[in-house]
Amino acid sequence: MMTVPGHESRPILCIVGARPNFMKMAPILRALGAQAGAPKALLVHTGQHYDAAMSDQLFQDLALPNPDVNLEVGSASHAVQTAEVMRRFEPVVDAHKPSCVVVVGDVNSTIACALVAAKKQVPVVHVEAGLRSFDRAMPEEINRILTDQISDVLYTTEETALGNLTREGIGADRVHFVGNVMIDSLLANRARAIPVAQTLSKGNIDPSLFGKRKGYGVVTLHRPSNVDDVGALRAAIGTLVEVSRRVPLIWPLHPRTRANIERFGLTSALASARIACLPPQGYLEMLGLMDGALLVLTDSGGIQEETTALAVPCLTMRDNTERPITIDEGSNTLVGADRVLILRLVDEILRAGGKGGRVPQNWDGRASERIAAHLVAWLAEHKARDARRRP
């Protein structure tokens, strides 16, 4: 195990890069700020989320402080983006000599900053460790596996994650079940969620057509398997059109999804459907949309968790998930691209309300508090151990 340098002034570097990171890091920063004895936490934004306006909106929605460092890497291929984050993050580590680096989730910024820290002998703390889809065609799966291997402290959202980590040779002493920080943000902000009628009005859509509570569904699709192949995207749109004949849908379009719809000439397929297409939405807008929805169709990992916490039936248009607890205990069902299954489940939801599930253990809004308390104690222990080793 690595040791922590014996300097109280050495900060904790907290890394965000893409949209899901912001929801996970906001409560951690607040908890560290409130934890007695915690080193100063510095927020490093890699700039992987390249829509500047949306990034600014997320910071505002989540009451995140302005980043102390912005690497401004922007969009690129996985290899180029990961390399550029590493190149720009290394001088930050050299300048601040942090006590540890905290990374969340599974995006390119997560593995890039973890690699830099590990090579610099700075402890790596991974929040949301141990999740596995067992599908290495997903870039995020590679990021998860590698980040966990080089992390000194691994905080998990569900107890089954320990089994995944144990099979990969990671000692149980490094793993700590704390719960889900994504749900910390959801519970803290639920009362501030933007009403669906307000969101639709901003998009110049008549709320009376789509905005009745529990009278609409929400769609999010962004994964390459669903939107980068013309056949897959055409099939997905065909399914959504069929669903919209049963219940109107609200679809905030990811920029890549919108671009592919236009590039593949599929815009006309949506013309007569009861689908309200919106630009990407802020956190509070999306929270309001999901909280009032009858159902959600998605390929997002985070939304599987959020719908479970909200007890909203979720149909996940993927063949696997790294969040099995949302199926075993929550409101999620894997449906892949199976149109017959999707329509059958939509009919069941309309008839009987669908799968509600229950909220998993420790998804109680206090995961970040548990992380802060454990991490501060862990840093103190390793500082003391390092001092004893010095002559």
Image (cartoon, rainbow, N blue to C red):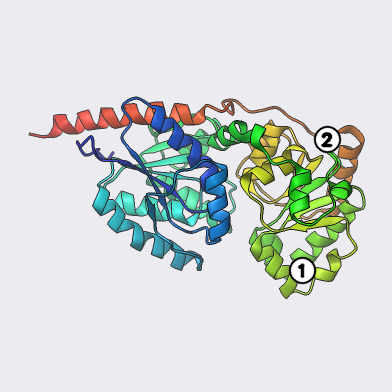
Nearest the viewer among 25 and 281 is: 281
Residue wearing tag 1: 231
Image height check: is 322 above or below 377? below
Q: Tell which circle, 1 or 2, labels the residue nearer the N-terminal end.
A: 1
> Whole-percent x and y of residue 325?
64, 35
Instruction: Tell me the quarter of the image containing the C terminus.
Output: top left
**In this rendering, position of residue 27 left or right of residue 95:** right
Mark 1 to mark 2 CA distance (whole Å): 29 Å
Instruction: Kindly state the secondary structure of the residue where label 1 is placed.
Output: helix
Q: Which quadrant: the N terminus?
A: top left
Instruction: Answer whether labels 1 and 2 touch (C-beta < 8 Å).
Output: no
Nearer the observer, disc 1 or disc 2? 2
Indicate the amino acid at tag 1. Gly
- Amino acid carrying label 2: it is Gly
What x and y, as percent, mark residue 239? Answer: 84, 57
Residue 352: percent from the left, percent from the top? 89, 33
**Quarter of the figure with residue 35:** top left
| Circle 1 residues within 10 Å: few <14, some 14–19, many ≥20 | few
Element type where label 2 sits in the image: loop
Identify residue for label 2.
354
